[in-house]
Image (spheres, rainbow, N blue to C red):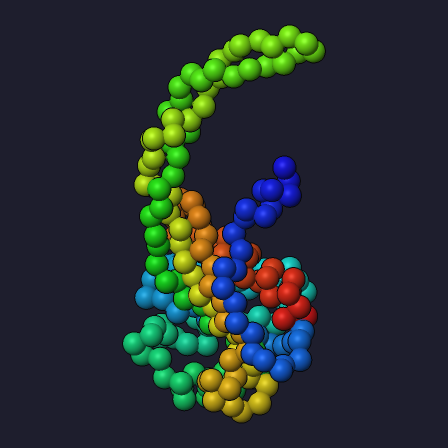
Amino acid sequence: MLLLLVSCGPSMTSNWLKPNIETPKYYGRIAVVAVSSDAELRDVLEKHISHRFEKHGMDNVVYGSELFQDNIVQGNWNEAHITETLTKHRIDGAIIVSYLGDLNLPQYDNNDLYGAPANQRLGQHVNLRYTEVSDPDYYTSNNKKYWFEAYLYDLSSMQSKEEALIWKGQSSVPSPSSVKKGAKRFSKVLVDHLYKKEILK
């Protein structure tokens, strides 16, 4: 049962790793930059991803909100300014994270039960009894999945944004009560994945 619960948990649903690079990578100073117009969501992502890094022994994590006073959203992404700022603060690795949106999926409502016959064998005897199961025709649509995307950049040498990109991935986090709680769960999925797959050390 424990194995089933773990296997059904949130995970990185898509991954890309730059070919022909040596992994795992170590960064002495890594920046966590959340791209969002929602200041609270940005803070949640940067805080919880940073805390997950610290649990893995990385003790020199910098919040993107400390580096960039203006919020970095897709519309005002200035590559030269970002590169200059990261270089100035001696950042050699950066995680850029964004929230992609949510998706409503149909879900069983387990509260709607009906009686169904079930046979129970006791030795040579078979007893007919009734058990309660979910109505197979009744669904609800309150099962949200929150989608997030992350990019890992190696800034140890002066490169373009495309050349510095070494990994990217997406993940959907199902059924949390809010996008902020989804962000917390995604933070764990993201960082644990990078260490489990030995992309970081």
- Which residue is found at the position 55% from the left and 15% from the top? 119
Q: As rendered, which of 39 and 49 lies closer to the eye?
A: 49
Q: In this rendering, is residue 95 above or below 147?
A: below
Location of residue 161 in the rendering, given as x and y in whole percent from the top left corner: 46, 85
- Which residue is found at the position 63% from the left and 37% from the top? 1
Location of residue 152 in the rendering, given as x and y in whole percent from the top left corner: 53, 74
- Which residue is found at the position 38% from the left and 43% from the top? 143
Location of residue 51 in the rendering, given as x and y in whole percent from the top left corner: 57, 60
Can I make out residue 145 in this image?
A: yes
Q: In this rendering, is residue 21 above or below 201?
A: below
Q: Quadrant of the C terminus?
A: bottom right
- Which residue is found at the position 49% from the left and 56% from the top? 186
The single residue placed furthest to the bottom in the displayed view is 158
Total labels drawn? 0
Q: Is residue 72 left or right of residue 11?
A: left
Q: In this rendering, is residue 92 above or below 51?
A: below
Can I make out residue 187 in this image?
A: no
The single residue placed furthest to the left in the displayed view is 75
Location of residue 78 in the rendering, given as x and y in whole percent from the top left corner: 36, 84
Q: Is residue 182 left or right of residue 26?
A: left
Q: In this rendering, is residue 129 above or below 140?
A: above
Q: As rendered, which of 30 and 10 lies closer to the eye?
A: 10
Q: Quadrant of residue 56?
A: bottom right
Q: As rendered, which of 146 and 134 lies closer to the eye?
A: 134
